[in-house]
């Protein structure tokens, strides 16, 4: 029996109510605009018919009349939207997808998974298929864009690779521990999930500003990021000359080494004078 008729009979007048809901009869506009009402009813009938047909295809009862799943996937293609289909795996999973070809008949055939049935309704999947196929009609390759996005690593992943492959074997153990501490405390929580290619100078400057209350650590973090991005350019993770740390000015601070150089037995006033003199020498631009 036709699924549309079965739906009408099982729900008595539920089918008519759904068409009426799609036609939006609540404002009684059909009394004033009969033509618009007729068009709305036809549109609602078409949308509901497509939904019932797709539900019949993806429901267990609807598949009983289809070939049983074998060792290969089964593809059901939409009759109206070319390239939009449903894949049924041997395990019974149902996946919405699109298939297209760029470059004419000799071009490469590509497929993109839209989502699983249940997570998406047939109408929602069809709308997404229209959007993706529209990009194909404009000459874009959605599958290539997806592959490129997947290949682009996050800042956190490449930073871990930098610490493992460069810092640990080529720097002192104390330096490696300090870099690991800075990365764990200040970089990974704030920017670790961002794609490496998306990091700009504004992102680095904003991170540096977020650590303004810890000016010494802010400068150390900026220095680590600068070395990291130079390494990333060297190994092809970013284009040459794209270090976003350039032109980001450090905070004027008294280096910790100056504290260790001052003898602990100096009188209090002399100690303060010596400290101020050394701070002024290390930051002449402030004076």
Image: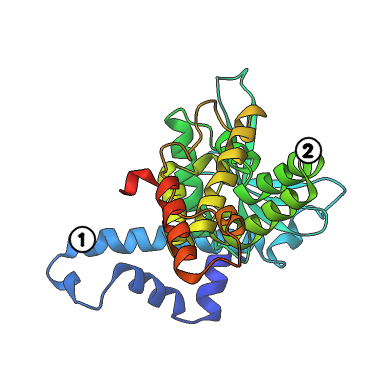
Quarter location, residue 26: bottom left
Q: The N terminus appears in which quarter of the rendering?
A: bottom right
View extreme (right): residue: 71
Residue at 64% from the left image edge and 25% from the top image edge? 108
273 in relation to 15, above or below: above
Residue 65, image x, y percentages: 74, 58
- Coloring basis for residues: rainbow
Name the one closer to the observer, 43 or 242. Answer: 242
Residue 5 left/right relative to 284: right
Q: Is residue 89 visible?
A: yes
Name the one closer to the observer, 286 or 88. Answer: 286
12 in relation to 70, above or below: below
SS category of the residue bearing label 2? helix
Name the one closer to the observer, 189 or 56. Answer: 189
Residue 160, image x, y percentages: 71, 49
Contact between labelled residues 1 and 2, with CB atoms less than 8 Å apart: no
**Does label 2 or label 1 sit earlier along the sequence?**
1
Quarter location, residue 93: bottom right
Category of crowding for the residue at label 1, using alpha-carbon neighbours closer than 10 angstroms: few (below 14), some (14–19), many (at least 20): few
Mark-to-mark CA distance, 2 and 1? 75 Å
Residue underneath mark 1: 36
Residue underneath mark 2: 170
SS category of the residue bearing label 1? helix
Circle on res. 96: none
Residue 151, image x, y percentages: 65, 39
Residue at 21% from the left image edge and 60% from the top image edge? 36
Residue at 20% from the left image edge and 77% from the top image edge? 27
View extreme (left): residue: 32
Name the one closer to the observer, 137 or 24. Answer: 137
């Amino acid at each position: 029996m036709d699924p549309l008729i079965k739906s009408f009979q099982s729900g008595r007048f539920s089918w008519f109510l759904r068409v009426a809901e799609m036609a939006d009869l609540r404002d009684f506009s059909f009394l004033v605009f009969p033509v618009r009402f007729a068009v709305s009813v036809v549109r609602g009938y078409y949308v509901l018919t497509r939904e019932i047909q797709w539900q019949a295809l993806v429901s267990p009862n609807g598949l009983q009349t289809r070939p049983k799943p074998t060792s290969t996937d089964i593809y059901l293609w939409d009759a109206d939207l070319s390239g939009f289909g449903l894949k049924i795996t041997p395990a019974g999973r149902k996946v919405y997808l699109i298939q297209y070809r760029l470059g004419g008949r000799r071009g490469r055939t590509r497929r993109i998974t839209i989502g699983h049935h249940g997570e998406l309704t047939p109408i929602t999947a069809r709308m997404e298929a229209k959007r993706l196929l529209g990009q194909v009609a404009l000459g874009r390759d959605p599958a290539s864009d997806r592959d490129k996005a997947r290949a682009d690593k996050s800042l956190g992943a490449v930073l871990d690779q930098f610490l493992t492959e460069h810092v640990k074997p080529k720097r002192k153990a104390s330096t490696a521990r300090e870099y690991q501490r800075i990365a764990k405390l200040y970089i990974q929580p704030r920017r670790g999930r961002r794609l490496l290619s998306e990091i700009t100078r504004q992102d680095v400057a904003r991170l540096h500003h977020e650590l303004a209350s810890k000016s010494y650590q802010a400068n150390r973090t900026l220095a680590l990021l600068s070395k990291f991005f130079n390494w990333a350019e060297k190994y092809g993770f970013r284009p040459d000359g794209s270090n976003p740390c350039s032109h980001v000015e450090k905070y004027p601070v008294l280096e910790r080494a100056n504290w260790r150089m001052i003898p602990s037995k100096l009188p209090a006033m002399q100690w303060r004078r010596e400290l101020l003199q050394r701070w002024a020498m290390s930051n002449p631009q402030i004076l």
